[in-house]
């Protein structure tokens, strides 16, 4: 073979090598949606037509404008990791964190898709951590529960400096943090159902293997969305799965196998005893699960701070905030559930997951009974409320229109005089309550028709006295007027007494677009305009008669 033939053969081998690498990268590119089939075919033809063996696959595809630089860097990383896992085909990167990186992979022989997690190199050098990891992964492989992600396989990669890895169940669904980003807060009943499922799974793990998860948080709870009711954003049959048992710890584990030189966990949901580095049991996970429920219902974590140290210090020293202060609509049972689960002392919390599940059932029963009375749709999701003291004196009128409640109060002397006769309240179709400040004083002359306070939607209202009141010269109520207003018969029979100011305290909530305490009275100007119109009409009639 001549030198020219040898050179050509070498170039052909190098071209074939690039083609093979490109063929191996094709499933990864298609799984991530970075390119389509015809672009890959064009790249393969270009790889065979020139000398590109010195380029990586990612750099080669960037030069062809098939991938971006960021996509090429991720592709090269996956191809590099692929050499360490011959039994699995890595498809795409699902995420990474303090413990390691998770890839979507496919088993070479069975074709089953799994979530393959590799442990970071900084933890792999700790032999005590490796020993604990192996023992607890083997224990978790014997745990089977519908709300715990199953572990299929695990091992140590000799080709990658002894790094640990495990293959777990792949859940194709969002985690709770994704739902929080989309909806800000989750409904009370839905959140309680999800937390109950996770509590059942953790109870099974604790009772069978005596393992503590230590990293309960919304990101580690994945949801398998129901397809039975596509129109329902929060269906009852959504299934929750708890993942990432990489931080598990046995209740009686040797401290030499649990100390890694750092505090592992998420400070936002970490129990006080975990911050202090004490021995943990199931009550530490109860604290983290309760803190997660707090976040789902209020849209905020229980404690915040400028640094992880500040947050952990708050878990140790600051009182647990009442979730009802942020969301007053929460039931009392749900508030007690969170406050008990997040008690500072371990002995003050639920002693077992079974006790916590019983409390969740009570909260579900109370929340279901509350919602059975009818759901009121709001224009915004539940948000924080600011308490504002109500001004005393005067009267109120509550008008329900377009699914909202508006409160009208007289703001000045003229509006007080116009609003004093009656106070109208329309509560619901089954319950009507009203308060009357004073009976209506009638003039011997027929009064001019007064404009309604809600001209866009006339309502049939009923006036009912809230407390026994009276006025001089009391007369029986007339028949229903043409406007549809009725006077309660007890108003005519009530004795005379001065009107009592109402001094209830109400809260101002941002759940409305407008201030619910903003007065809706029409003021003096419309009355002047109406009087001018009546005078003009009278003048016109007099001139026409002459």
Image (tube, grey):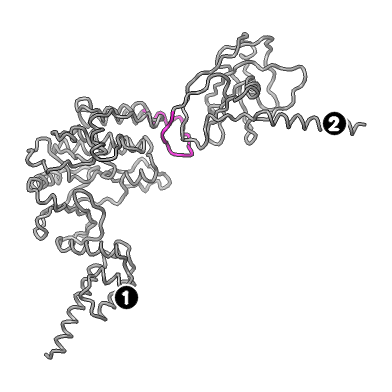
Q: Is 51 located above or below residue 339 in the figure? A: below
Q: Nearer the viewer, residue 201 or 470?
A: 470
Q: In this view, does 295 lie to the left or right of 211?
A: right
**Image quadrant where residue 320 sits:** top left
Secondary element type, mark 1: helix
Q: Which of 126 and 233 is in front in this view?
A: 126
Image coordinates of residue 72 in percent, x first then y, are 27, 65
Which quarter of the rendering shows the N terminus?
bottom left
Residue carrying label 2 = 539
Q: Where is residue 275 in the image (x, y as percent from the top left)?
A: 19, 35
Q: Circle 1 is placed at which residue position?
A: 42
Estimate the x, y position of residue 98 in percent, counting from the top left.
Answer: 20, 48
Vertical side of 16 occupied by 523: above or below: above
Specify the segment rendered in magenta: 366-386
Q: Against 20, is 85 above or below?
A: above
Task: Tell me which numbered mark, 2 or 1, is placed earlier along the sequence.
Answer: 1
Task: Kindly identify the residue that appears in the image at 80 percent across and 30 percent down.
Answer: 535
Q: Which residue is drawn at 25% across and 63% down?
A: 73
Q: Position of residue 274 (x, y in %)?
A: 18, 35
Residue sitting at x 32%, y 48% = 174
**SS for dot 2:** helix
Q: Disc number at residue 321?
A: none
User: Farthest residue toward the bottom?
Assistant: 2
For the residues marked 2 and 1, what is the alpha-carbon distance in whole angstroms? Answer: 90 Å
Crowd class of label 2 (few under 14; some 14 to 19; many from 20; radius 10 Å): few
Q: Quadrant of the C terminus?
A: top right
* Residue 131 within the segment the image draws in magenta: no
């Amino acid at each position: 073979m001549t030198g020219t033939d040898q050179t050509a053969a070498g170039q052909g081998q190098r071209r074939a090598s690039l083609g093979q690498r490109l063929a191996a990268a094709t499933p990864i590119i298609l799984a991530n949606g970075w390119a389509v089939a015809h672009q890959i075919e064009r790249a393969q033809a270009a790889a065979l037509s020139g000398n590109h063996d010195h380029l990586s696959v990612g750099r080669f595809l960037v030069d062809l404008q098939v991938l971006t630089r960021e996509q090429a860097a991720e592709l090269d990383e996956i191809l590099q990791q692929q050499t360490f896992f011959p039994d699995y085909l890595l498809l795409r990167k699902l995420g990474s964190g303090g413990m390691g990186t998770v890839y979507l992979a496919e088993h070479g022989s069975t074709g089953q898709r799994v979530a393959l997690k590799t442990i970071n190199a900084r933890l792999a050098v700790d032999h005590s951590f490796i020993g604990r990891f192996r023992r607890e992964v083997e224990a978790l492989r014997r745990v089977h529960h519908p709300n715990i992600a199953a572990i299929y396989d695990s091992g140590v990669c000799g080709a990658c400096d002894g790094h640990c890895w495990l293959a777990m169940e792949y859940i194709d669904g969002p985690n709770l943090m994704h739902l929080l980003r989309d909806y800000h807060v989750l409904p009370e009943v839905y959140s309680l159902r999800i937390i109950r499922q996770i509590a059942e799974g953790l109870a099974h793990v604790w009772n069978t293997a005596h393992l503590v998860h230590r990293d309960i948080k919304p990101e580690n709870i994945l949801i398998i969305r129901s397809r039975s009711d596509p129109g329902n954003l929060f269906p009852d049959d959504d299934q929750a799965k708890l993942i990432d048992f990489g931080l598990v710890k046995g209740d009686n584990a040797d401290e030499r196998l649990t100390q890694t030189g750092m505090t592992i966990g998420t400070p936002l949901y970490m129990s006080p005893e975990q911050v202090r580095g004490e021995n943990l049991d199931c009550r530490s996970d109860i604290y983290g699960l309760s803190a997660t429920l707090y976040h789902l219902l209020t849209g905020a974590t229980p404690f915040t701070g400028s640094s992880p140290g500040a947050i952990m210090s708050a878990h140790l020293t600051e009182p647990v905030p009442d979730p009802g202060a942020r969301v007053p609509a929460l039931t009392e049972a749900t508030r007690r559930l969170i406050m008990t689960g997040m008690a500072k002392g371990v002995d003050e919390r639920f002693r077992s997951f079974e006790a916590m599940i019983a409390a969740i059932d009570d909260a579900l029963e109370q929340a279901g009974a509350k919602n059975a009375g009818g759901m009121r749709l709001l224009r915004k999701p539940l948000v924080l409320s600011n308490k504002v003291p109500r001004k005393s004196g005067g009267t109120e009128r509550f008008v329900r229109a377009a699914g909202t409640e508006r409160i009208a109060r007289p703001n000045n002397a003229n509006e007080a005089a116009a609003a004093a006769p009656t106070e109208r309240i329309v509560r619901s179709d089954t319950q009507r309550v009203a308060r009357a400040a004073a009976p209506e004083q009638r003039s011997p002359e027929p009064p001019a028709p007064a404009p309604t306070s809600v001209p866009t939607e006339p309502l049939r209202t009923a006036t009912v006295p809230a407390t026994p009141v009276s006025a001089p010269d009391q007369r029986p109520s007339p028949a229903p007027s043409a406007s549809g207003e009725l006077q309660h018969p007890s108003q005519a029979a009530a004795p005379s007494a001065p009107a009592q100011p109402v001094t209830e305290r109400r809260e101002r909530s941002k759940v409305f677009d407008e201030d619910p305490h903003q007065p809706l009275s029409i003021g003096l100007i419309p009355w002047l305009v109406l009087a001018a119109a009546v005078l003009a009409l009278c003048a016109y009639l007099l001139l026409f008669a002459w």
